[in-house]
Image: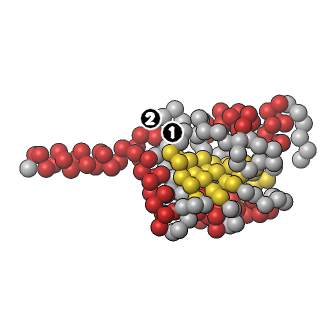
Amino acid sequence: MQEDKSSKTFGRILLAAPFLTPALRRHALPYVPATREQLDNIFHLLRQYSTKQRRHLIDLGSGDGRIVFEAVQQGFPRATGIEINRVLVYYARLKAYVSGQSKICHFKRANLWKYDLSKYDTIVLFGVDTMMEPLLKKLSKEIADECVVITCRYQFPINYDRTHGEGIDAVWLYNSQTIQNQLSGKPTLS
């Protein structure tokens, strides 16, 4: 009887570990799925702001992949999600395979701090307050010209180009020139 309880406890710990270990990282990013309103706000901003056809979106911390799947539904020819949680990456890959979208929806287990973002023209992320400034510095060195970055829940500590929504559903859009100019101290046109 005692052995049965021990194996159940061990099984629960094993299942919960991928979802609890983010709290042990420098920038704790718990898995919280995007709401329908947040998805609508992200793609509303992209339609409103972007004058050119966007080619490749990346979602930093893609969780179960819902932003990546929505991007493809909204007309992106390719979308990629990077996520450090192995279970969520496998889940998103399985969902892409089952839905027949595995050739255009890619999911990678990767650390966003070490991942090269230069080949993407659209970057989406749900961050936490403590990571926004270091991530802004990384982006300023890597993003391509004409790239747009959309942040959800937290904004960068610089002026944004556009915003949409309120409260936890608010999203902010920054273009590459805004990011690079503000970090270099150059004035921006508002």
Neighbor class of circle 1 (other Cα within 10 Å; few <14, some 14-19, many 20+) is some
**For residue 50, above or below residue 188:** below
Neighbor class of circle 2 (other Cα within 10 Å; few <14, some 14-19, many 20+) is few
Q: Which residue is mark 2?
A: 24
Front residue (pair 65, 29): 65
Q: Which mark is residue 136?
A: none
Give the x, y percent position of residue 164.
73, 58
Give the x, y percent position of residue 189.
91, 44
Q: Amino acid at mark 1?
A: Ala
Tell me the distance, in whole angstroms, between the alpha carbons under discs 2 and 1: 7 Å
In terms of secondary structure, where does tag 1 sit?
Answer: loop
The answer to whether residue 155 is visible is yes
The mark total stands at: 2
Residue drawn at x 79%, y 33% is 183
Q: Name the side, left or right, on which 35 lies relative to 189.
A: left
Q: Name the side, left or right, on which 9 lies relative to 185.
A: left
Give the x, y percent position of residue 56.
69, 54
Residue drawn at x 75%, y 54% is 163
Residue drawn at x 64%, y 68% is 73
In terms of secondary structure, where does tag 2 sit?
Answer: helix
The answer to whether residue 126 is visible is no
Give the x, y percent position of residue 137.
71, 33
Front residue (pair 70, 44): 70
Question: Residue 139 lies in what quarter of the image?
Answer: top right
Asked if the residue under mark 1 is in contact with the one under mark 2, i.e. CB atoms within 8 Å, the reply is yes
* Scheme of image coloration: secondary structure
Front residue (pair 104, 112): 104
Q: Amino acid at mark 2?
A: Leu
Q: Residue furthest front?
A: 103
Residue drawn at x 50%, y 45% is 109
Q: Which residue is mark 1?
A: 28
